[in-house]
Amino acid sequence: MNELPFSPACERNKGPIADVLKQLLPARARVLEVGAGTGQHAVHFTECMPGLNWLATDVPANLAGLAARFAREAAGRLAEPQPLDVAHGPWPAGPFEAVYTANTLHIMPFSLAPALFAGAGEVLVDDGCLVCYGPFMDDGVHSAASNRQFDLSLRDRDPTMGIRDTRDLERLAEAAGLRLDADIELPANNRILVFRRTEPTTSDRVSSQAS
Ligand SMILES: C[S@@+](CC[C@H](N)C(=O)[O-])C[C@H]1O[C@@H](n2cnc3c(N)ncnc32)[C@H](O)[C@@H]1O
C-alpha cells in the first residue's frame, strides 16, 4: 500500500487528545481501541506514551490500511490490528485498563451503541475506563452551531448517523456497569467523555458465585 489512509482531523486532534490521555491513563496500561480508522491515533499515542500496550481494532475492511501504517510507522511497537465489529464481536480477550474510541459513536448506528458500552464493560478491569472522543450534545442541545451543521450533514448522508446525546450515553453506560466520570472539552467543540467501570463484569459475577 503506497498511500496510507490519512485523516487531517487526526493530525489536528492527536496532540490535544494525547495531553488528556497522559493525565488519565496509568503509565503502563493495556488499551483496546475500537474503530481505529487510519491508525494515526494509535501511532501517535504509543510514540508519546511508551508504557501503553495498545491494541487497535476496526471492521475488517480497515485492517489492511491499519497494518500498513503500523508496519511503516510503528514497527515492533504496535501489535497486528484485530478485527472488531461491535455489531457482532467477538471482542479481543481482555482485560484492559482502558477502551478508547474516537469519532465512532456518531458514525455507527445508535442501535449499536449499547453493544459498544456492554463490550467495553466486559473487557475492562475494575476501575477501568471507556474513553470516548468526539462531538456530543446535551439534552438535545448542540454546544456549537458547527456541531449542529455537522449533525445535519451526517443525518443527510445516512439517517442512522448523528451526534449522540450524553444523556443517552449515560443510560447505556449505566446498563453496562459504567458511570460518567469526566467530561473534558477539547478544541473544535469536541469532548472526551470518560466512563468508569463501577460493577464487576458478568464473568466476574459468575466466578464469584461459583466460589
Ligand atoms: C470517522 S471514523 C473515525 C476513525 C478514527 N477513530 C478517527 O478518529 O479518525 C469512524 C470509525 O468507526 C468505525 N466503525 C464504524 N462502525 C463500526 C462498528 N460497527 N464496529 C467497529 N467500528 C466501527 C469505522 O470503521 C471507522 O474506522
Image: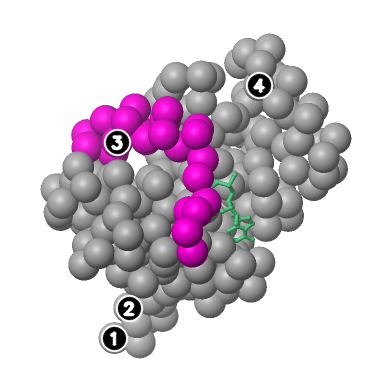
Q: Position of residue 94 (x, y in %)?
A: 34, 71
Q: Tell me which secondary structure the magenta stretch mostly adopts.
A: helix
Q: Residues within 10 Å of mark 2 (few under 14, many from 20)?
A: few
Tell me if the residue at label 4 has its CB under 8 Å from ligand 1: no
Q: Position of residue 123 (x, y in %)?
A: 40, 66
92 is higher (above) or lower (below) than 56: below
Q: Which stretch did the figure color magenta?
A: 1-23
35 is higher (above) or lower (below) than 7: below
68 is higher (above) or lower (below) than 144: below
Q: CA–CA distance between discs 2 and 1?
A: 5 Å
Q: CA–CA distance between discs 1 and 4?
A: 50 Å
Of the 4 image quadrants, the one containing the C terminus is bottom left
Mark found first going from the N terminus, 4 or 3: 3
- Which amino acid, by three-letter code, is at mark 1? Ser
Q: Are marks 4 and 2 in contact (CB under 8 Å)?
A: no
Residue 18 is marked as: 3
- Out of 197 and 73, give the one closest to the viewer: 73
Q: Is residue 70 left or right of residue 53?
A: right
| Residue extending farthest bottom | 210
Residue 201 lies in the magenta stretch? no
Q: Secondary structure at mark 2?
A: helix
**Camera sees residue 135:** yes
The mark lying in front, picked from 3 and 2, is: 3
Q: Count the marks: how many?
A: 4
Tell me if the residue at label 2 has its CB under 8 Å from ligand 1: no
- Which amino acid, by three-letter code, is at mark 4? Asn
- Out of 14 and 194, give the one closest to the viewer: 14
| Residue extending farthest top | 145
- Which amino acid, by three-letter code, is at mark 2? Ser
Residue 147 is marked as: 4
